[in-house]
Image (cartoon, helix red, strand yellow):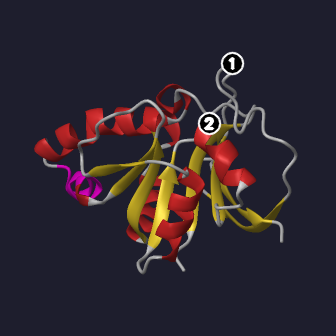
């Protein structure tokens, strides 16, 4: 069975929005290597509409500029959870009907991990149905002060810390699994 892995950037005060404002000073080779390893262990992406639209607007241009990682990102199949999106391009399929059942079905297919970027409304459903196998919370040594908070509005959920990955930049990736 494939794993569904969530990868999310977060500040010390729990903010996930606008990582380009607070995260970029910490993006270095160590950060890139960890992200590449997660990405390389996956053969599909799961995205909510907002993340999908943001990525679809950027990654094709990066490939045109010669970015080698962009070619792989653009080629990967993408599954998009959205109630409003009526059409998807950028090698994507809109999940229709019971999204939880569709994601559970995707996890049963042969292949590598399914990587989910972005945190938002989709996470409520994923948590409720216990569909995420690993959370990779990239804790940045920054305080944003305001913005969308990590898993805001989610009922109490307990996780088990399985490993940490500290970087020289001050980022610490906290890897959690659902408490069984």
Q: Which contiguous range is marked in magenta? A: 67-74
Checking the image for residue 146, the label placed there is: 1
Alpha carbon of mark 1 to alpha carbon of mark 2: how far? 18 Å
Q: For the stretch drawn in magenta, what is the main secondary structure?
A: helix
Please indicate, yes or no, whether residue 34 appears anywhere in the rendered image: no
Furthest-front residue in this view: 97
Find residue 126 and report its horizontal and vertical position in percent: 65, 52
- Secondary element under disc 2, as helix, strand or loop, is helix
* Label 2 Cα crowd, 10 Å radius (few <14 / some 14-19 / many 20+): some
Q: Position of residue 147 (x, y in %)?
A: 65, 21
- Circle 1 Cα neighbour tier, 10 Å, few/some/many (<14 / 14–19 / ≥20): few
| Residue 106 image point, x, y percent | 47, 67
What residue is drawn where x is 59% and y is 42%?
Answer: 122
Residue 180 figure quarter: bottom right
Q: Which mark is residue 120?
A: none
In front of the other: 11 or 80? 80
Write down the quadrant of residue 177 in the picture: bottom right
- Mark closer to the observer (1, 2): 2
Q: Residue 18's x, y, as percent?
A: 52, 27
Q: How many marks?
A: 2
Please give the residue where the numbered disc 2 appears in the rendered image.
121
- The mark nearer the N terminus, 1 or 2, is 2
Q: Mark 1 falls on what kind of element?
A: loop
Asked whether 179 falls inside the magenta stretch, the response is: no
């Amino acid at each position: 069975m494939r794993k569904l892995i969530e990868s999310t950037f977060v500040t010390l005060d729990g903010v996930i929005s606008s990582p380009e404002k607070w995260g970029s000073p910490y993006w270095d080779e160590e950060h890139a290597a960890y992200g590449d390893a997660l990405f390389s262990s996956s053969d599909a992406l799961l995205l909510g509409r907002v993340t999908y639209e943001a990525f679809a607007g950027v990654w094709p241009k990066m490939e045109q500029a010669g970015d080698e990682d962009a070619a792989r990102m653009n080629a990967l199949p993408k599954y998009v959870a959205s109630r409003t999106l009526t059409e998807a391009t950028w090698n994507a399929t809109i999940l229709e009907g019971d999204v939880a059942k569709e994601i559970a079905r995707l996890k049963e297919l042969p292949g590598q991990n399914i990587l989910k970027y972005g945190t938002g409304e989709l996470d409520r459903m994923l948590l409720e149905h216990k569909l995420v196998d690993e959370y990779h919370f990239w804790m940045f040594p920054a305080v944003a002060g305001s913005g969308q908070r990590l898993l805001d509005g989610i009922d109490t959920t307990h996780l088990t810390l399985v490993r940490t990955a500290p970087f020289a930049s001050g980022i610490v990736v906290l890897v959690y699994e659902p408490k069984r």
